Structure formats: structure tokens, C-alpha cells
Image: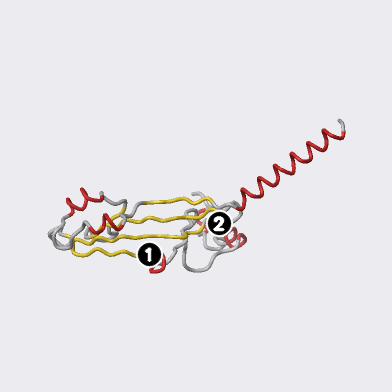
């Protein structure tokens, strides 16, 4: 290889490394969910609108009340992803529309990220209470607790 080819190869590698480094610094913003905007919220009238009219105006939400069917919750989140960091929620809007026993809108409330808590969910584990056993404790835990008649045959 000639010196000019090696020089071009080095500059090409340098440009590629610089481009990858710059790409790692730029965040990727992802939007999750849906929450109606202010203009849509102003169309909903407390005491006048019903579930049906709310559904026709802004649509049915992805989530409802967990323990009761008296509310609809619209949740929209904006998450920032960096190549080298964990994703971070940078904005969240929650719109809660509560209905009375006649399915008429009783209240419309909006909440932002500042009113809520971020709950980290670990989907691979289920928290248990009590102490955790070491690997040796797990291996030898049942020694002495198994009755002797299990090993004898009649």
C-alpha cells in the first residue's frame, strides 16, 4: 500500500469513529401512549357528556380504573434514550376522566410528571419479602427435614 492510501484509510477510520461518537451523544426521543390535547379536553363538559360522547370526541383510552370501572385514564409519556444510559422519562401527561353511576362525566383532571412518581418496573423478577437464601442454604435446606420413611421400602 502506498502512503496516500494509508493516509486516506486513516482519515476514513477517523471520520467513522467521530460519526459513531456523535451518534452516541444524540438522544433518541420516543413517545408512548396517548393523552388528549387541551383543545380536545375543552370539548368535554362535566355533567353533560357521557361515556359515549367522550368516546366519540377523544376515543377510548388504553387503560381504565384498576379496581372500579368509574374512570378512564389517558397516559402519554416521552422517553429519552441515550446509547450509554438507561432510558429516562422526561415528560408524562395523565388525563383522568371520572364518571358517576349514570355514566355522566363527574370530573376531568390532568396530571404531569411533577405530580406523580416514576415507578421502575423490573419485568424479570417478582419481589418477595423475607430473607434470601444463599446457594449453600438452598442446597442443604432440606437435610434433616425429610422423614426417614421416604427412603425405606416395605
Give the foreground label among 2 and 1.
1
Give the residue at x 20% y 48%.
Answer: 56
Residue 18 sits above or below residue 143 on the image: above
Q: Along the horizontal axis of the image, is 124 left or right of 110?
A: right
Towards the viewer: 38 or 102 = 38
Q: Along the horizontal axis of the image, is 60 left or right of 8?
A: left
Q: Position of residue 86 (x, y in %)?
A: 55, 56
Which mark sits nearer the N-terminus, 2 or 1?
Answer: 2
> Dot 1: what SS?
strand
Extreme residue toward the front, this view: 4
Q: Which residue is mark 1?
A: 112
Q: Which residue is mark 2?
A: 86
Instruction: Sort mark 1 into few (<14), some (14-19) or many (20+) by Cα contacts within 10 Å.
Output: some
> Dot 2: what SS?
loop
Residue 134 found in image quarter: bottom right
What's the distance in space between the residues labelled 2 and 1, CA to CA?
21 Å
Give the residue at x 25% y 51%.
Answer: 58
Q: Along the horizontal axis of the image, is 5 left or right of 18?
A: right
Amino acid at each position: 500500500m502506498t502512503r496516500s492510501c494509508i493516509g486516506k484509510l486513516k482519515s476514513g477510520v477517523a471520520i467513522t469513529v467521530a460519526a459513531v461518537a456523535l451518534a452516541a451523544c444524540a438522544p433518541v426521543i420516543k413517545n408512548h401512549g396517548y393523552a388528549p390535547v387541551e383543545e380536545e379536553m375543552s370539548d368535554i363538559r362535566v355533567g353533560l357528556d357521557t361515556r359515549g360522547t367522550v368516546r366519540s370526541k377523544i376515543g377510548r383510552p388504553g387503560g381504565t380504573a384498576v379496581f372500579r370501572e368509574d374512570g378512564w385514564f389517558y397516559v402519554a409519556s416521552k422517553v429519552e434514550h441515550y446509547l450509554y444510559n438507561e432510558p429516562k422519562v422526561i415528560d408524562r401527561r395523565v388525563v383522568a376522566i371520572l364518571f358517576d353511576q349514570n355514566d355522566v362525566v363527574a370530573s376531568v383532571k390532568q396530571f404531569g410528571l411533577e405530580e406523580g412518581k416514576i415507578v421502575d418496573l423490573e419485568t424479570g423478577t417478582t419481589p418477595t419479602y423475607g430473607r434470601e437464601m444463599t446457594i449453600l442454604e438452598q442446597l442443604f435446606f432440606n437435610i434433616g427435614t425429610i422423614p426417614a420413611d421416604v427412603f425405606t421400602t416395605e
